[in-house]
Image (cartoon, rainbow, N blue to C red):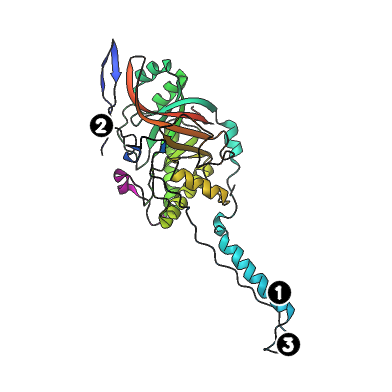
């Protein structure tokens, strides 16, 4: 369902910014969550699967006995080969067996990125500078901006430019840049199904990561900053789809890291975030450095998410706990999503 654009109208003695979005945020995948505690997507406990790598062949030493007899060394060799094949089948693929650090540790990027703990809001259309000044009176001190990507719903962003980013930063706002790229082949939201990942997920992931970095740089977002890939809710129970999505995300992460930024990841707690945690526990490399999970109709609970182990992504988490909530601050009324942050934020220069 299309989302109406933000419009400005009179409020008190100033201008009221009042986006009415019929319960839709960046994607209709987040609309109409269940009235009980839930993530922003249908639940699925199915684990994504990677194709097991082929077991290496093993040849035995030449036997000194006749063809009808089997020596102990040959039995031992055959047994070891069978054991090795079993271990290989139970392990992640070779490319995912060990967490990769090809482009340097994330610690170097965390060292330069500012760290923020507190409340943030995100909104589809970037608010005016006047609205951002008005909202300085709120409890929020960080803002999520949808700055690029072929899957971005609010493509017309008249307020978003390098000057806006600099000005809001000077006001004291922290910035969380969100890139809405290609979506999982099994994405739920109908308005995202036209931008699904194609037949070459790794190549596509690298290409879109390069675009994400270039567009961030154009806004004055410096290296070391987190860039969040928005992957709307999808069916993680579809093994083929989950594998393609993970290939895309890992390639995107690898390229973003290689260009000096921190790869972040936003998704529903019960789909993309669950898959990232399962991949982490399996020893898969090139995973996000920062995780932003959506679970609505609950209190802010950054470290109490059931899809994540408590020790995972420590001080690198954001919880989106409410969506499309209308608030008024400083004379400006906006419908926003509420977030609690314990994570690095953008460097602005």
Label 1 Cα neighbours within 10 Å, binned few <14 / some 14-19 / many ≥20 = few
Image quadrant in which the N terminus is located = top left
Q: Bin the neighbour count of mark 3 within 10 Å (Cα to Cα): few under 14, some 14-19, many 20 and up.
A: few
Location of residue 204 in the rendering, given as x and y in whole percent from the top left corner:
41, 51
Picture disc at residue 65: 3
Residue at the disc numbered 1: 76
Across and down, in percent, residue 83 comes to: 64, 68
Is residue 345 or residue 86 the one in the foreground?
86
Which of the two discs, 2 and 3, sits closer to the camera? 3
Position of 257 with respect to 215 (left or right) is right
Is residue 194 magenta-colored? Answer: yes
Image position, residue 189 (x, y; %): 32, 44
Mark 1 residue element: helix
Q: In the visual, does 203 lie left or right of 334? A: right
Residue at horizontal 40%, vertical 55%?
Answer: 238
Give the camera-side residue of 161 and 197: 197
Segment tinted magenta in the rendering: 187-200
Residue designated by label 2: 4
């Amino acid at each position: 369902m299309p989302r109406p654009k933000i419009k400005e109208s009179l409020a008190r003695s100033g201008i009221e910014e009042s986006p009415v979005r019929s319960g839709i945020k960046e994607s209709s995948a987040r609309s109409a969550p269940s009235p009980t505690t839930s993530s922003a997507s249908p639940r699925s406990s199915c684990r994504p699967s990677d194709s097991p790598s082929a077991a290496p062949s093993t040849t035995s030493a030449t036997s000194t006995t006749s063809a009808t007899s089997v020596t102990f060394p040959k039995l031992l060799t055959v047994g070891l080969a069978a054991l090795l094949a079993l271990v290989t089948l139970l392990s992640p693929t070779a490319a995912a067996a060990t967490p990769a650090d090809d482009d340097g540790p994330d610690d170097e990027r965390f060292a330069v990125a500012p760290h923020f703990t507190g409340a943030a809001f995100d909104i589809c259309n970037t608010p005016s500078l006047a609205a951002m000044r008005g909202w300085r009176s709120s409890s929020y001190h960080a803002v999520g901006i949808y700055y690029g990507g072929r899957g971005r719903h609010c493509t017309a962003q008249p307020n978003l430019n390098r000057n806006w980013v600099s000005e809001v930063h000077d006001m004291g706002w922290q910035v969380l840049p969100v890139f809405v790229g290609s979506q999982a082949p099994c994405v739920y939201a109908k308005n995202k199904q036209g931008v699904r990942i194609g037949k070459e997920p790794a190549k596509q992931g690298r290409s879109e990561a390069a675009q994400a970095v270039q567009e961030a740089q154009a806004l004055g977002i410096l290296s070391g900053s987190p860039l969040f890939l928005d992957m709307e809710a999808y069916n993680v129970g579809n093994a083929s789809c989950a594998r393609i999505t993970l290939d895309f995300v890992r390639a995107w992460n690898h390229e973003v890291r290689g260009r000096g930024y921190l790869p972040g990841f936003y998704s529903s707690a019960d789909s993309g975030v669950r898959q990232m945690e399962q991949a982490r526990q399996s020893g898969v490399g090139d995973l996000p450095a920062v995780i932003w999970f959506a679970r609505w109709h609950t209190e802010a609970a950054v470290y109490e998410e059931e899809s994540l182990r408590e020790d995972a992504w420590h001080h690198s988490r954001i919880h989106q706990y409410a969506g499309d909530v209308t608030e008024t601050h400083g004379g400006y009324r906006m419908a926003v999503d509420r977030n609690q942050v314990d994570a690095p934020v953008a460097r602005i220069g």
